Image (cartoon, rainbow, N blue to C red):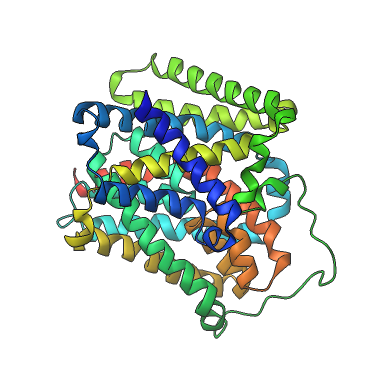
Amino acid sequence: MILTLAYLLVPAIIVIACQKFSWLDKAGVVVLSFGLGIAIAAGLDLTLLFNADTITAVQKDVSEITIAIALPLLLFSINVKNALNMAGDTMKGMALALLSVIVISIIGAIIFADQVADVWQVAGMSVGAYTGGGPNMAAIKTAIDAKESIFVTMVTYDILFSAIYLLFVMTLGQRLFGLFLRKYEPKNEAGEIDYAGMEHLSDETANGYKKLTQVKLLPQTVAALLSSGVVVGLALFIASLVPETYKSTTTIIGITSLGLMASFIPRVRNLANSFQLGMYLILVFCFTMGTMTDTHIFTNIDLSLASYISFILLGSLVMQALLCKLFNIDTDTFLITSSAAIMSVPFIPVIAGALKNREILLPGFAVAIIGYAIGNYLGIIVANVSRALVGA
């Protein structure tokens, strides 16, 4: 019980610290949660305090349950109709981004088949991460029964390489790709942004979590949590009706589909704090996964796996850029859609700010949300296609 509470509450301490110290918040609560978890794994032997089997069981339960509950909460707040309407031309760029990730992941799976163990699992989880986000990667891990060791290593490498990708996009991306992609043409230079009901996605700082402490919103927060529980319960019930082999996949598809369906119900979609609560559970998940990290990953780098992930990031970026040139898509749209796929929703304001283009913020949100919604489906499909191609 004490260990479980620690996993649930430590991210809250991180959020409070980030709210008090702006310089700390710049690193990001997600990165800090995972980083602290890794630091604990490296510097604190939890077996001195708890039984090893207990630690493993708690870590497994907390990571799986938080992701299962977080997914519907994130999906509840999506206004699918608005997202599709707002995406406009940006949707074309996102489609090219998704296609690039899928194609490069499958090609990479074939190339690295003899070098990366269970490469089809890596391919599926990578597509989930780089079309949707971390929650999608975790969900796909459950859906395809991927090995825990592969998943933990992937999460670590994903954070490292995604940070490099983000730094590149924010510093050199616009200048470099602007050499052969056309310049963005402003549509409304002076106008204020209409977030069209998605204001809750625009604050990537720790301050966004303050709403969770508002007593007047507590009933709605509880209602959102209960609604997510109902979705997970229904998905588990549906999964119990299928053969054992397909239960995990059915559960994740069920959670995703039912969560999306619930978002069409105004009363559910408008529940306060569903997105914030979902993101907090993601922090709990990140912290828990960090404590599960085998720190030998850093001293004994799996060059094959690291090379495959790098191949996906670099390859999909280049492929999308070439496709954007073919389809006459501008530089900013290319970069925001690539970032929406690779980095997901929380980083859209950061990228838009680096591009000095507020106008592209809302379309960026819209396509990143769509990536969240379909990432699980794409990842599961790619995992099975890759498995068939490599004969696993």
Left or right of 147? Residue 192 is right
Foreground residue, 114 or 62?
Answer: 62
Task: Check the image and report above or below for 182 versus 107.
Answer: below
- Residue 249 x %, y %: 37, 30
- Is residue 283 in view from this perspective? yes
At x 77%, y 48%, the residue is: 196
At x 73%, y 49%, the residue is: 85
At x 27%, y 47%, the residue is: 41
Task: Check the image and report above or below for 184 versus 269.
Answer: below
- State the residue lying farthest toward the right: 191
Foreground residue, 225 or 168?
Answer: 225
Task: Check the image and report above or below for 58 versus 372.
Answer: above
Foreground residue, 96 or 126?
Answer: 126
Please identify the quarter of the rendering in which residue 20 is found.
bottom right
Q: Quadrant of the N terminus?
A: top left
Q: Quadrant of the C terminus?
A: top left
- Residue 274 x %, y %: 63, 34
> What is the count of numbered marks?
0
- Residue 316 x %, y %: 42, 64
- Residue 167 x %, y %: 47, 71
Left or right of 247? Residue 29 is right
Left or right of 281? Residue 189 is right
- State the residue lying farthest toward the bottom: 179
- Is residue 121 in view from this perspective? no
Foreground residue, 247 or 350?
Answer: 350
